[in-house]
Amino acid sequence: MNCRLAVVCALSCVCAWSQTNVVKYQATIGNVKYVYASTAPVARLKSGDILDTNTLDCFGDAIQKPGDTLSQAKGDNPLTGPFYVEGAEPGDTLAVKILDLQVNSDQGIGAFAPGFGAINPTNYTPMLAPALPEKIWFFPIDHASNTATFQGLDSKFSVKIPLHPFFGCIGVAPANGEARSSIVPAEFGGNMDSPEASVGNTVYFPVNVSGGLLYLGDGHAAMGDGEVAGTAIEVPLKARVQVSVIKGQKINWPRFENDDAIMTVGAYRPLDDSLRIAFTELVGWIHQDYGLSEFDAYELLSQVARIHLNEMVDPNYVVVASIEKKYLPAKKHDNR
Amino acid sequence: MNCRLAVVCALSCVCAWSQTNVVKYQATIGNVKYVYASTAPVARLKSGDILDTNTLDCFGDAIQKPGDTLSQAKGDNPLTGPFYVEGAEPGDTLAVKILDLQVNSDQGIGAFAPGFGAINPTNYTPMLAPALPEKIWFFPIDHASNTATFQGLDSKFSVKIPLHPFFGCIGVAPANGEARSSIVPAEFGGNMDSPEASVGNTVYFPVNVSGGLLYLGDGHAAMGDGEVAGTAIEVPLKARVQVSVIKGQKINWPRFENDDAIMTVGAYRPLDDSLRIAFTELVGWIHQDYGLSEFDAYELLSQVARIHLNEMVDPNYVVVASIEKKYLPAKKHDNR
Amino acid sequence: MNCRLAVVCALSCVCAWSQTNVVKYQATIGNVKYVYASTAPVARLKSGDILDTNTLDCFGDAIQKPGDTLSQAKGDNPLTGPFYVEGAEPGDTLAVKILDLQVNSDQGIGAFAPGFGAINPTNYTPMLAPALPEKIWFFPIDHASNTATFQGLDSKFSVKIPLHPFFGCIGVAPANGEARSSIVPAEFGGNMDSPEASVGNTVYFPVNVSGGLLYLGDGHAAMGDGEVAGTAIEVPLKARVQVSVIKGQKINWPRFENDDAIMTVGAYRPLDDSLRIAFTELVGWIHQDYGLSEFDAYELLSQVARIHLNEMVDPNYVVVASIEKKYLPAKKHDNR
Amino acid sequence: MNCRLAVVCALSCVCAWSQTNVVKYQATIGNVKYVYASTAPVARLKSGDILDTNTLDCFGDAIQKPGDTLSQAKGDNPLTGPFYVEGAEPGDTLAVKILDLQVNSDQGIGAFAPGFGAINPTNYTPMLAPALPEKIWFFPIDHASNTATFQGLDSKFSVKIPLHPFFGCIGVAPANGEARSSIVPAEFGGNMDSPEASVGNTVYFPVNVSGGLLYLGDGHAAMGDGEVAGTAIEVPLKARVQVSVIKGQKINWPRFENDDAIMTVGAYRPLDDSLRIAFTELVGWIHQDYGLSEFDAYELLSQVARIHLNEMVDPNYVVVASIEKKYLPAKKHDNR
């Protein structure tokens, strides 16, 4: 069975799985990391391998019941990994196809976390105004109906929200010897809080160090655009992803792709610049792989582009720009 | 009056259809305006009246064939109106329900307009770099299939795009005696380039002067998020809208509503602040009309809000934040 | 006419002083304006005339003693004018040389004004946080020592601050038929809050309508960079300025000049874009009038430019970029 | 001789120097670093020690003559260090007093560096516009007159610029296990490009790791506000600084101080947020050490604050906000 078939039938097939290697790794509060960095890997994968693992929630699973406080979390966004992918070298691209994600608990957590939030004072948009009071919402998860339930703290209102599990954190070791906190999104991916990091999508990262060094974490059961109050419905995840190396293809920023669309990530602030990054990357991708001139690509995007504002609460703000493949010419040569 | 309109209006009107007044007004290049201002109205409407009118495209319909140039346009975004709505006084809200929009030509125009664009130097993000060359794309409109066709200028690629006609410009006279150019979006609406200004939606505006003074223009046959290259598929429109006055309800920024969702507009720059405006308005709307506490509303939005980045190319940037009504409690008292 | 003025004007005028016409105009709360617009002038000046007038403080002189409240102000930034300058036509430049400014009261006012402030939530950077409480500081003015005295409200500390009187508001009628609130700075000048609008400096404005239509107001006795809490030491002024028309010279943004430096204004938000506007204008000015290539000008500015961040509290933020003339070649031809 | 006296007379005194320990360290292209990180120190200092060292220019001294190209530089901003300061532990403050800086070459370099510049497209404000062409200006240094000479590349103009040597890079190991590129300014200092990092000033840093780990580099012979074209007059330096540890004083961002003023640093983007950081820090400093209420401090700053926009070209933008001590009450208790 070749790699591509393995991916297609990954969820359900009982067929020749033995031909695709599956690596299992168990994350615990004792082996998680808090920075994306070039450090000793916890496991090694071959290009094409499947990784079965899990992630803790952004609080290290420390918040469990009313009365618990954010101070009980040892750190933000504990990361599973890093995973070394053999053959990945600087200048290559690492592709991570997300095969399966399951919410690994019976409740999710939402909180006003100090320093986070789109419409309250934060560490990097500070004001002479009091911080939000610490508040924690618990969202019961119903696995049967695939929903989480919002329950008002101040009012007797509750409502079900469909689950859309994804990795808030997915990234690789940064370039230039940098090590970045697990709360930061940037060129290496990281805390992108992109709902695009979900089943059916492939994420591409620039490889900056030998092995790429993949990190996973910060599972979200569901999240609104912008993650405006600073957290999603935070959950631990069980995860299955497949890694592969695209040799000799250099990209500058993370990208997503599925059968229907190509998507680029821009991450910095203000949002204006995140968007500029995402769109110059998208124009470049269309130009390079699909052959439209830059000006034709720019004009076409003006009519059919989609913008998904992922979050405006982390130190850098993340935007995903995309175009559906049905609006594009045939790919010049399928090298991905 | 046809049955379709009867349905559209059914919620509030118990009267016979014959009793809904329809006012007709024909816009021409000779009677359009280029500023939102407190000026003599072209027609007067009663609350509940339907307006049948038309809008010129953003170039005043001056670009018709290859070889035409942007300099042939007399001005940007010629506006139909203003329409005086009787009974509308400062402190009230003007509701404009969009009943019908038809593309009123057989082609649309896209162009690189000097000073506009998300990833090129502009008037307000100037750079020591050459401006984009003037380029014009013509999009044939197929009314039967309801599509426009993108045709590459530099490549032999063409693709059909579904029509989604909307008003790029819809607004009222500004507050405080201001008069604003038809290229600007702000508290009074204006050049919001919101695809939400389309059939099935109601737009709410603060009334700043007697009669509100409604302006319409800048029809778009379709547009990508962000309108990144500076124009949509620009077309003249035939339009039918219904106006009504909500007495004693004061809002600060435009809002949209339909059967499924409530939506708020934020317009300024950077996008960070547009988003802050839209979300503080949305939290306030939920709190006031649906009874959630501000903190519960904020947390709920963090899980289910939608952000639609309308444009990042006009002098001010426009974001629409929304929540589906299915996630909200029952409205406290329906006063709208 | 006193000797001091003669000296001030000495550079260009070789004529007898008696030949310089002085127009006097008295502003009162009954004749001030609250928008920059194309409206009937209060007086007409010839190019070269001197205007002797006065301005009310930003509260219309309504705050006089402890216990007074901001609600007593009829509006913000009442403006003296407009003054029609004969011969000024669109495409020309209006030069306003500031000859004399005197603080016209024995105290100045500082206040937390709702919606203003660099590090508190405002109208355009709103937050889910309480607004600052209304607070008013009174600054006694000592005309003999030319100082104002800060007196703490919460502490027994007071300190003298040297006076540097300037116009917070100075501008002309906007282009394109716009009318703008007296709290806004933009291409037409307006509420720039530029300490550069002080004695010894000349301000240049683009002429957008016949007569230019000069407005003056919002006197400041002194102000810190950024005007961070939202107000300066607000005072009424007695003012003497000289207007002149530079025919056929078109500028896009206001400029300042004195014997030592040339200065350009950028006004929008975020500050990044204000600065981009100011520096592209300054590179263009150096290139056009002093003959350096754009690239040489850009590099030279990288080594010797000065940036004065005037305010980050009005709807648009104002930056002045400047270069001392000692760093420039001789002017190509003195046409100013 | 106590430490304080040693500092005061450092430049000229031949007196009891022997009592202050002087550590010498020679930086070369072989021992420089390119990240601020927690790594093995090159030398250890005691609190109160003086460090005599040198820094390479931002190109590693690789650009020497016309025809040389930026590609000859091994990396940007090679750093001298790190230096371990004994007793410095997380939660303390490291004070670095700059005693002497000498330009260590006969010419300085200015260049258009790809990705840098305030009014050209960059890595984080990318545009569909060509990058600036690579250009290098050489500035002869005249040590006798203490000037550098700008020489136009495109025109026969040259002009002398007074030297004001300072460290473009000065910082410590970041918090939370991060390692940051030498082109980035942030909470740990770094590539702040602050002319305040010059003789007579003391810089304070938060201590994030044992020993603090001080790095120095990126000497500038002079620089305009904003460093708008992306480089200053880049030079190697000979440097003498004195380090001391302030136990138990925790700060969040770098600060500067001299006899006349206290100064705070804000570093991120947009500039709006850099300024918000600097001013909330400055209000906090005044409140804590000088006893004014936060509101009094805010109002006082509105009248007398100074803002120095250091640079808008690095990944994060740096602003220094300051107040002269003559405007402040006596310090509550001198613990610094």
Image: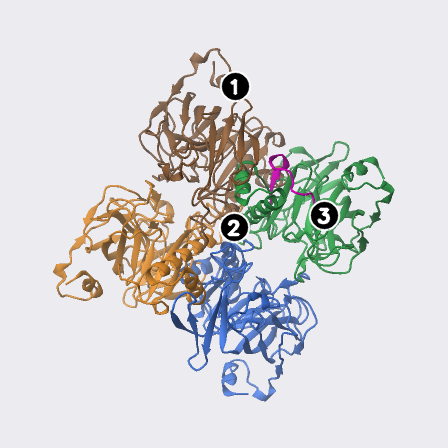
Chain colours: A brown, B green, C blue, D orange
The region drawn magenta spans: B319-335
Q: For label 3, count other residues whose C-alpha is less than 10 Å away and answer few (under 14), some (14-19) or many (20+).
A: many
Residue type of the residue flagged with mark 2: Met
The chain that hosts pointer 1 is A
Taking the spot 55% from the left edge, 71% from the top edge, the residue there is C63
Q: Which residue is mark 2?
A: C127
Residue D145 belongs to the span the image colors magenta: no
Residue type of the residue flagged with mark 3: Ala
Q: Position of residue C23 (x, y in %)?
A: 62, 82
Q: Secondary structure at mark 1?
A: helix
Q: For label 2, count other residues whose C-alpha is less than 10 Å away and answer few (under 14), some (14-19) or many (20+).
A: many
Q: Between residue D305 and residue B296, name the one nearer to us.
A: B296
| Callout 2 touching callout 1 (CB < 8 Å) | no
Residue D95, quarter of picture: bottom left
Q: Is residue A216 shown to the viewer in this render?
A: yes
Q: Position of residue B18 (x, y in %)?
A: 87, 42
Q: Which residue is mark 1?
A: A8
Q: Secondary structure at mark 2?
A: loop
Residue B321 belongs to the span the image colors magenta: yes
Q: Is residue B136 shown to the viewer in this render?
A: no
Q: Please state which of the two labelled residues, at mark 1 or mark 3, is closer to the viewer.
A: 3
Q: Position of residue B113 (x, y in %)?
A: 64, 49
Quadrant in which the C terminus of chain C appears? bottom right
Q: Which residue is mark 3?
A: B95
B147 relative to C265 in the view: left or right = right
A144 relative to A244 in the view: left or right = right
Q: Secondary structure at mark 3?
A: strand
* Mark 1 to mark 3 CA distance (whole Å): 50 Å
The chain that hosts pointer 2 is C
Q: Residue furthest right?
A: B18
Q: Residue furthest front?
A: A156
Q: Between residue C331 and residue C43, name the one nearer to us.
A: C43
